[in-house]
Amino acid sequence: MIPVYKHTNIKNLSIEAQKLLVHCMVCPRKCGVNRIKEELGQCQTGKDAMVCSYGTHFGEERELVGLHGSGTIFFSYCNLHCVFCQNYDISQRGEGYKVSAEQLAKMMLDLQNQGCHNINLVSPTHIVPQFLQAFLIAKEKGLNLPIVYNSGGYDSVETLQLLDGVIDIYMPDTKYSSNDLGEKYSGVKDYWTVNQLVLKEMYRQVGDLVINKQGLAEQGLLVRHLVLPNQIAGSFEVLKFIAEEISKNTYVNIMDQYRPCYLGDRFTELSRRITQQEYNEVVNFAHKLGLGLRNLLCNHE
């Protein structure tokens, strides 16, 4: 299905988004730096996006991968500083290189030419203005794949509103059901407060996940939740919120692959993998809430 864009003038959206960089308000941190002049805030990214790598990826959810893979673009840096990040070389140490809007557009078109089923933007929260510039170029040159917004779930609702009708599939994390834990482990004071608003806005834009006859996602919301040891993530509260405040038809990927990466082993409570019992308890609770087998993805390594 070729995406139908609600906004007929992507150029105007891009211009509005660029204004957010002057006194940076792109994400909820609102650092206030002038990224156009290469002043750096928490995301360590100036006026140009940085990319670590791009290519066909088969490690995503089956609804994104299909036969030919998801066309992923891994952006460098992140607006979160998660102590257990498995991609810390990219998100915290900034492996990658600067790209112009034209180069980013070419990456998207290359992925389409390779037969990928979608364009998967990994950690795009801090580079929305740069993406919109590139998207405009790529769209004019024939880009017609669904766009996946794959974020840590700490996004600005105002920035997301600029993407209404541009993004086809939102795939945010919901990491914790506690602001205190968001501050302790991800370096932001209001993660849970913001994340709830983010999920509601994303769902308002795209609704429940729509799967076509080939088993591929075309549009909608897919939420990822990583189970942490010792019930740290507050998984029950996360799932309860999704079931009661978003939709019982929400696709939720309950992930079991936590391991103490990066700085994780410095925290006693995070210094081990989860047990099978810890994981099963979360999955069983999801079923009790009515998040059924049809829309519940259980991701085992």
Image (cartoon, grey):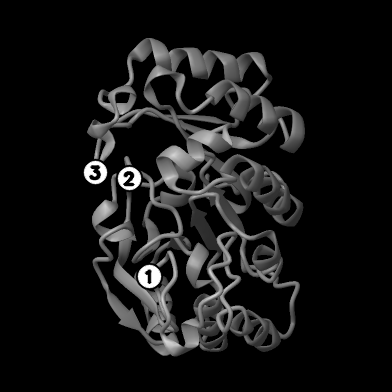
Task: Give residue 262's mark.
Answer: 3
Residue 198 versus residue 300 in the image, above or below: below
Q: Is residue 294 left or right of residue 261?
A: right
Q: CA distance from mark 3 to mark 1?
A: 19 Å
Q: Position of residue 109 (x, y in %)?
A: 42, 79
* Sequence order check, earlier mark of 2 and 3: 2
One can see residue 61 in this view? no
Kind of residue at badge 2: Cys
* Sequence order check, earlier mark of 3 and 1: 1
On-image quarter of the C terminus: top left
What count of labels does the image hold? 3
Dot 2: few (<14), some (14–19), or many (≥20) neighbours within 10 Å? many
Residue 287 versus residue 194 in the image, above or below: above
Towards the viewer: 258 or 36: 36
Task: Give residue 85's mark.
Answer: 2
The secondary element bearing badge 1 is classed as: loop
Kind of residue at badge 3: Tyr
The secondary element bearing badge 2 is classed as: loop
Q: Position of residue 268 (x, y in %)?
A: 28, 24
Say whether marks 2 and 3 touch (CB < 8 Å).
yes
Task: Give residue 44's mark.
Answer: 1
Residue 18 versus residue 295 in the image, above or below: below
Kind of residue at badge 1: Gln
